[in-house]
């Protein structure tokens, strides 16, 4: 197994090389090992996918549960793992920063902090507090003995604030506050991606499923460095389950079994990780 320092340095290098890379989002150990078996170079958690796997909605999982989940995924393969840490489970900057320290102790080599508060009445943190929280998280990351890649997320576009200018302003401030990667989930066009990347000097993570029909090459040309899938892979698995269930329940048939991955293929992909 690779060491945490080796993973951290490898993850950092992915952000420094030419072109873009895809970082898929597994939701459990099995999906992490299958994705690793397919040859991906890094993995990221999905808060929604993990919550759904517990029978809950996004935002209904505790910090302790997330950290234990991250510990399991970090130990599941040799790949670097970055985590969706939501708002770091705290409004207070110092407590949010403490989550970064705990995340590193769980084996992660990267993680995110976002400006979505979780409060429906005031979903986005005020600008000053949002920047202070990123700065505190960055300071905590710099105290670690390996290069922890901190991603700062501006959540406007996902929570009813369709203001790209303010989103860019926040990302620029997060960059200045010490974030290593910037992320504005909710971009829906390549022109929006270009607008954001053109305003930043550090790498941008793009949530690919919201840009319908785009390719890795197109996103790279628009300036994206890291391309993630969020909860989409987990929803793809849920979609297949629901379709199969509906066919059995409503149609009394089993046509969904006609194009299953073979047991041999699954065994091959998991074989490298299962003793």
Image: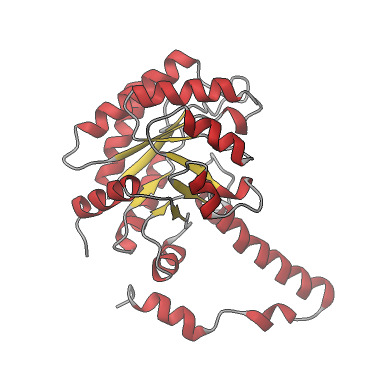
Tell me if I can see residue 29 in this picture.
yes
In the depicted structure, whether residue 160 falls above or below residue 38? above
Q: Residue at x 34, y 46 (%)?
A: 15
Quadrant of image for the N terminus: bottom left
The quarter holding residue 41 reads bottom left
Q: Residue at x 56, y 49 (%)?
A: 208
Q: Position of residue 191 (x, y in %)?
A: 61, 36
Seen as rendered, the residue at the extreme bottom is: 264
Q: 67 or 175: which is nearer to us?
A: 175
In the depicted structure, whether residue 160 falls above or below residue 205? above
In the depicted structure, whether residue 263 falls above or below residue 19? below
The quarter holding residue 238 reads bottom right
Residue 17 located left or right of residue 168 = left
Q: Position of residue 167 (x, y in %)?
A: 54, 25
Tell me if I can see residue 91 in this picture.
no
Residue 51 located left or right of residue 113 = right
Q: How is the image coloured?
A: secondary structure
Residue 78 located left or right of residue 222 = left
Quadrant of image for the C terminus: bottom left
Q: Residue at x 83, y 71 (%)?
A: 250
Seen as rendered, the residue at the extreme right is: 251
Q: Position of residue 17 (x, y in %)?
A: 32, 49
């Amino acid at each position: 197994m690779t060491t945490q320092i080796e993973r951290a340095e490898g993850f950092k290098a992915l952000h420094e090389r030419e072109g873009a890379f895809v970082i898929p989002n597994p939701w459990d150990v099995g999906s992490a090992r299958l994705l690793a078996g397919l040859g991906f170079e890094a993995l990221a958690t999905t808060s929604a996918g993990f919550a759904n796997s517990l029978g809950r909605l996004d935002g209904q999982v505790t910090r302790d549960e997330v950290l234990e989940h991250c510990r399991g995924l970090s130990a599941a393969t040799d790949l670097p793992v970055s985590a969706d840490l939501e708002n770091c489970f705290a409004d207070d900057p110092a407590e949010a920063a403490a989550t970064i320290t705990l995340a590193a102790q769980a084996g992660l080599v990267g993680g995110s902090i976002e400006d979505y508060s979780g409060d429906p009445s005031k979903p986005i943190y005020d600008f000053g507090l949002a920047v202070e929280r990123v700065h505190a998280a960055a300071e905590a990351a710099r105290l670690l003995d390996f290069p922890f890649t901190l991603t700062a997320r501006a959540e406007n576009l996902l929570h009813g604030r369709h203001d790209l200018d303010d989103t860019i302003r926040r990302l620029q401030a997060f960059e200045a506050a010490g974030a290593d990667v910037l992320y504005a989930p909710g971009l829906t066009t390549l022109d929006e991606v270009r607008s954001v990347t053109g305003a930043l000097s550090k790498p941008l993570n793009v949530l690919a499923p919201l840009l319908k029909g785009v390719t890795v090459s197109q996103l790279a040309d628009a300036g994206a460095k890291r391309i993630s899938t969020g909860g989409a892979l987990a929803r793809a698995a849920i979609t297949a389950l629901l379709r199969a269930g509906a066919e059995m329940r409503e149609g009394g048939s089993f046509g969904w079994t006609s194009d299953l991955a073979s047991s041999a293929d699954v065994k091959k992909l998991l074989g490298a990780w299962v003793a």
